Every structure is written in C-alpha cells, then in structure tokens.
Amino acid sequence: MGDAFGGDLFSVFDEEADEKPLGVPSPSPSRGQKKTPTKRPYGCEETGSAASERGAGADGIDELISRKRLKLERNITFEQNLTQLMPRVKTVRVETLEGCTHEVAIAQESAYETLKPRVGLPAKEYPFLLDPFQREAILCIDNSQSVLVAAHTSAGKTVCAEYAIAQALRGKQRVIFTSPIKALSNQKYRELHEEFHDVGLLTGDITINPSASCLVMTTEILRSMLYRGSEIMREVAWVIFDEIHYMRNPGKERGVVWEETIILLPDNVHYVFLSATIPNGTQFAEWICHLHKQPCHVVSTDYRPTPLQHFIFPAGGDGLLLVVDEFLDFKEDNFLQAMSLLREGGDPSRKRKGGNKGESNVFKIIKLIMERNLQPVIIFSFSKRECETYAVQLSQLDFNTEEEKCLVEEVFNNAMSCLSDEDQKLPQVQRVLPILKRGIGIHHGGLLPVLKETIEILFSEGLIKALFATETFAMGINMPARTVLFTSARKFDGRDHRWISSGEYIQMSGRAGRRGMDERGTVILMVDEKMSPTVGHQLLQGSPDPLNSAFHLTYNMVLNLLRVEEINPEYMLEKSFFQFQQYKAVPDLLAKLQALQGRYAALSVPDAASATSYYHIEQQLQRLHVEARAITLRPQHCLHVLQPGRLVQVTHGKEHFGWGVVVNFQRKPTSQEEFTLVVEALLLCSEESVRNAATEAPRPPQPKERGELQVVPVALELVEAISTVRLYMPPDLRTPEARHHVLKTLQEVKARFPDGVPLMDPVHDLGIKDPELEAVLHKTRAFAQRRLAHPLHTSPQRDAIRDICVSKAQVAEEVRAVRKEVRRAHMMLQMDELKRRKRVLRRLGFCTQADVIQVKGRVACEITAGHELLLTELVFEGLFNELSPEQAAALLSCFVFQEKASETPKLATDLAEPLRKMKECARRIGHVSVEAKLLGREDALLDDIRPQLMDVVYSWALGESFFTITTMTDAFEGT
C-alpha cells in the first residue's frame, strides 16, 4: 500500500506502466540527451522544485485531476472494448431425469433447440437398465451433438463411448477413441475389439489394423496425424477423449497435447469427453462451443453405484474408525478420537520408508481387512520402492487356496513363456511369483510390461487379494476392488511432502466398490501424524479439482504451427483453453473493478492538496523506518544484545505476535559462506495453533481467544523491534509453570510502560556507526520536521483525514491489482514467451525472420521425444556421424531415462566424449535462450540430460543380455 498514491491521491488511474506491451523496453535516450533521473525507492532525494510541487496550490492539483480523468476515460473505453471481445457463449440448463444434471453450451445469439427423441432402433442395446446420466448422454449422441460425461470412477461412462462408436459404425463413418496412456489404449483396444471387431490400434509401439473404422490411439498419435493432415481425418465423425480430466496435469506434456489436439480438430467432428467429476465442466463445454461453433452438452452425476465408507486407521491403533459414512456425513467425534491416538506433533517433511513401524501397521491392517472379508484390496503407496517393501513385509501371509496357487502359476508361466530362458531368470520375475501365489501383487511403472499385464489379469480374475500400487494405477485402468487403502495421507510431489489433495483422494478412492458385486466400498486412510479437522474434512470430503488449463508453449508446437499454412502459433494461443479461462474471468473482474471505482469515488478527502502532501510525508517516514530497521537488525549490529530474556517484537505478515522473549539464537548455514540467523523466542500463541502444531503454523491469539507462551523459531527479519528491557529467565522452560511465570512478568513490564516498552536506540544503545544508517536517520529527522511544520499536523481533523487517505490508498491498490488482472487476460500472457521462443529459433537457424521454417525446423518437427532443438543441433553438427549405432543409442538414452537420478557412472572415453559434446551444445542453446530472456541460466538444459543409463544401454546395444545389464544398475527392470 506504500505506493498506492505515488505522489498524489489520484494516481490509482495512472496506468501508463501497465499499458506498455510485454517485453518492450523503455525507449533509451538519444545521444547527447540526458537520462531522466530514476526516482529512489523511498523518495528521499526529493528536494527543491519537487518539494515545492508537493506543496503546490489547488491549480496544480486541478490540472493533475483532469490528466488522471483522461486516463480514466481511456481505461473505461478499453474495458468496454474488452467486453466485446469476450467469447459469446451461454449455458442453458436442460430438464432431465432425476439423478443427473444436464446443461448445454450454445452460442449467445442462439436459442436452445430441444433434443429430439430417437426414431427407430438404438445403435446399440444393453442387457441392463441404463442409468439416467447414460440415457441423457446417449440422447445427445443420437442427435449428433457433442457431450461431456462427468461421473465417478466405475460409474459406467464407457457405455456412452461404446454407443458413439456403434452410432458411427452404423453410419459407415470412422471414429477415434483416444486415451492418455498406452496401457489404457491397449486395454480399450481389447475391450472394443471384442465388442465391435472392426477396431485398430495405434500407439507408436504397436500398429494393428490401421484401416479399421474404429481406431484406438494415444492423444500424441492423433495430434501427429492432425499436424500431418492425415486423410483419415476426412472420414472421422466422432472423436472420444477418455479421462479428459487429466488435461489439467501441469507436470506432464499430456495436458498440452490434449489441448493442441482439440484445437486442431475440424469443426465438423463431434466429441464425447469422458471425465471424472469436475466442478467446472460447463466452462470446458463453453470452450468447445466457442472453439468449434457447435453445441456441447454436459451430463454429470454425483451418483455412485456403490456407496463408499471412509475409515481412518491411526498408526499404532488396533481398529478402524468410521469418519465418513455412505450418506457422506462427516463423523467429527470419530475423527478426533483417531487423532487422539496419535503422537503429539510430527514432522510434516518426514519421508516414509517403511521399516518395522510401517511393517506392523500395514501387516496389522491387511490382516484386519482379510478377517472382515473386505478383499480384494488395492493398497496405494506413493513410491515404487515402498510398494515392493510393503509387499515383501506381507510375504509371510497367504490369501490363496492351493487351487488358486496352481491357477496363478499356470497363468504366470504361460505369460512368461514369451521371454527367453535367461530373461525368465531375471530377479524381478523370480521375485514376484512367490508373492503372487500368496495372493499379493505389485503394480508400478518399474515392472516389465509383461509382468504388469499378467498382474492385471490375475487381479481381474480375483487371484490377487492385495495389490500394492502407485497412483498411476488409478488412471483409467478398469480394475475396481472392494477396498482401497492409503498407506499415507502425504505424498512427495517433487518439492516437498504435502497432504494429498481431495481430487487425488477422490480419484484413487473411486477404485473401491465393485458395481453389482459389493453393497458398499471401503476406503481406509492410514494416518501416522495429527491433522486438524479442517484438513481432514477437506481431504475426505473436499470437492474435485477443477479442470484448469495446463497449456504452455513447446518448440515442437511452434515449429509445427509455422510449418502448417492454415494456422499459426498466435492462433493456437488465442484459441487455447488457458486463454478462454482468462477471458471468462473478465466479466467478474470488470464488475469488481466497477464496484471498487465506486468506492474510490465515494471517499472524498477534504483539502486534497494538503492531505496529499501530508500523506506523502508520512509514507516517507514509514519507509525510512523500515530502512533503518533493516540496517539495525543486521547480525553484525544486533547479535550481541540478543541474550536470553531480551524483549523482541515479532510480526509475520499480517500477524502481530507483539512482545516476546528471546530464549536463544542459532546460525543456520544457507551456503558455504552465508548463514541466516534464527531467534528462538517465547511468543504468545493461540491454544488451538499449539494443539495443532503438526499441521498449523503458530499464530497469535484472537482478541477473545486464550493463548500460551511457546518457543517459536523466528527468522531475524521478522523481528520488528528490540527493547532495552531484559527479563530474568527460569533455567527450565519446559514446564507450563515456568512459561506462565515469564508471561506474568511480561504483562507486568507492559503495564509499567503504558506509552510503550522502551526501544533500543541504534546509535546510543547498539553503538552502530554506519554511514548508511546516518543518512537514513538524517532524512528521518528532516521529514519529521516537515511533518511538524505541516498545517494539517495540528489540525483536529488530522486523524480523520489520515484514515480517509489510508482507506483510499487501500482501495486504490485493489483497483490497480484488478486492472492488472484484466489487462493480463487481454494481453495473452504467453505471447511474450512465443516472441522469445521465435527469437531463439531464428538465432539457431530453425526459421527465418519472416517465420519461414528451414530444414533444421522441419527436422525438429519430427522429434517428439527429448529436447527437439538439442537433438536437431547434434544431427546438423554431425555428432551422430562420428558415433557407432551403439554409442548413438547410449547417448539418446539421456533423453529417455526419467527416473530419479542415481549417481552418474564413470563413463569410458567412447561415451564420455559424446556426452561432453552434447553438454557443450546444450550450453550454447542455453546461452541463446538466456539472451532471449527465456532461461535464467545457461546450463538449465543440462537438467534434462540424464546419463545414468548410458553404459547400460551401450552394453545392451553391443549384445549383452537383458539379464546381464540389469545387474549394472539399481533402476527397475521396467524402466
């Protein structure tokens, strides 16, 4: 809020900085022309004419106001023009059967036409009664209109996809079924081939019957077909997108590929989107309507064919506690009872590694599940190693009969017969059979594909009673169980250990409950640290994650769009779901802006010129105070007075803890040479935050809330002030009595100094001799004198006028923030990144200044894995001409290996030299990217080069057996 007014109360409408296009530098002065002096951060150099301008009369202010009003009028015109650019679509609610909702997105100027009942026989008949949402979706398909079907896992969304396929086949048209992963494509191919026969499969690895009327493929293959202008697309009537909710995944390229594909598809194609429940399905449908100029329906249901019961198993406990019943009632008493059985506190960043404690808990709960006949159970764990560790811990249990053991062995041996005799002796193959025979399975990305498929078959046939899986198992593969167990409520997301989101919980827990087989599904959450009821309620009963765009530019996308004549990268940005969501937020932002401007206009400041100058002086004093405090609290200046018992004032953001008492301080190294200072202080904290210390940060008590002193580590920069007062400290602060004694003494000190606890003087008490501090204090005295001499300072209305000024400043800041959001929505944030990427492509010779794609660019278009620019540069530098096929395969493994990097092996010269050249090339591209302001450091591309398997791949390419190379690395065999 410090800059809310700038030099006057009306600068809220000064938007010249915002109006400047992204990435356009300020014009530099011509030769011989003096640069305009840059205003110092705290305005401390403002003297002479500037100061006199501050005290200018009403005429100067009037001129200023008129200038601001012109800017205001320009802003209003911009906002009116912006509303005209908004996507003109609307959503109409359709009367529907009970048990589902039906909405349709249509053009703003269109009237909704009621769907016509089917005439004649359906394209496909089902031997069971369809659910309401299935009937509604099929009615949309019968009317040849696109539909998004949103329902819980295992609710029967596939019925709608099958009907669209049958409809297309009956009309002698082609249909494409696209799914996010190859495993899911393979499974859907098997299911659809069994049903329709005229089905093909395209995954990049496998091509089966590519001329079939129904083609199952990954989204990447469909995108490639669209970029190449495949003739197949001329015959396609329907495209089915399975698991479309994964489009929001920001950590994968999958979401971008989906968005690209949907934009590139022709307008005459109709769509069936299958999704888990999403709260903003209508927004997605509006995007489809806006993009392809056709209605798009949204049929959704919260109905679960098999209701779920949610239990908590507290670590160290002996039983399950029901926390959410099948009627979705949250049992807070049971939840609190579960938390009471856990230890106080806990380390949120702790990484679970199994161990004896994990063994006892998992062992105990699996036995409990089997005793209650709640199998089969899927046990979700968030790392491959954990899955294997837990499965081994259970290997002493046996859940299969002798007959089932024979069946498992027969299926397993038949499946493994496709492997060579040596590969059948692989440790992974040998290790998994004994536990499979006991009814225990493992499923994760590190398994050999043949093992994974075998385990899926055994699980679907009921021969695996307990399956340990990572969360990728929840992605679409249709294998429900009776029970789902989470081994932890936290997961590591690449940065830190966090609570799993409600969306992740919903997706995985949805695997519980088999339709037509189980009366209800059971979900069990193992918890080994306390969580607050708020966190528990949000996790167990939170809403699904919204479908937000994860769209971002890639070089492959930009180059492909430059190659295609009918479309360009700017069009892709403009039509993206990302940009649509930005536009859809604008009407609400404009309404908010209008309300704020009304509030701003209503705040009338008496004698605006005088109020402006006085407020400006107070701003300078506040800034100088902050500057002086920063100098004073440098470790070299204040360390010697931070003894135990010293009073310090602590502020964290908007939370003011008031005066606390120093207990100790410690240096925490941040690098080899630098350290940060952490003060351990007794602070008055709310009792609730103390109780929930494991999940909540300490906070001061509210006015009517009870508090207690707690030792809290405080970064030195959070210390607001240091007092001259120092209290006597009891030798042991662990007892409540000792802390209460300190609190009582602290209250007595505050009562003794009603005008405020005395503060350390930086010069007289701390003895600081710093020219920088002297300059700040000199300016502070000067501004203090100006404030004393100001006519408003002695006015009885001073405080009232100051309050109005502060309020107006706050509203001004809000107006600025909202206007920035509006402009951000209009300017297409990624347009600046596009310019920078094009700059890199031109510098490297992939395209011309006129955006005409060159030979390099055409080569890069064909590279869809790894880093397209780096690989193309290596090709044109002739590096691969110098390498044998074995060396080339080893070098390319650096782009394919995606696992967590172990130690880089010491490579032989014939591998180390190509790797060195590749890294040099990566640094050159990085240098160009840094100059284009696309990367922050030149070696950033080296993060994508992972040479951990180079020697392994090299040996394999030279003819070593798979068995031999698995002994050379600790990576999983299926990697």
Image: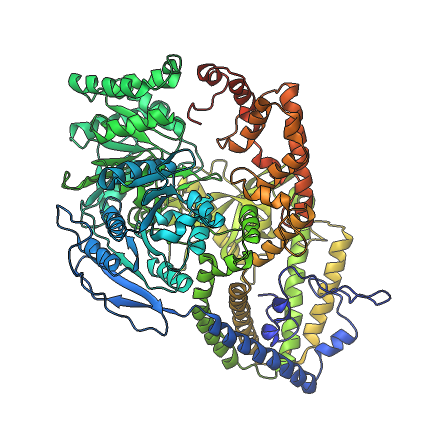
Position in image of residue 423 (x %, y %): 39, 16
Position in image of residue 969 (x %, y %): 49, 20
Left or right relative to 239: residue 83: right
Question: Residue drawn 50% across and 57% down?
Answer: 572
Left or right relative to 36: residue 462: left
Left or right relative to 536: residue 832: right
Position in image of residue 639 (x %, y %): 65, 43
Tell me: residue 676, above or below residue 949: below
In-front residue for pair 698/460: 460
In-front residue for pair 195/475: 195
Q: Residue 608 appears in which quarter of the rendering?
A: bottom right
Tell me if residue 250 can be seen. no
Position in image of residue 786 (x %, y %): 71, 73
Tell me: residue 242, above or below residue 835: above
Tell me if residue 441 can be seen. yes
Q: Residue 132 appears in which quarter of the rendering?
A: bottom left
Question: Residue drawn 13% across and 50% down?
Answer: 129
In-front residue for pair 9/455: 455
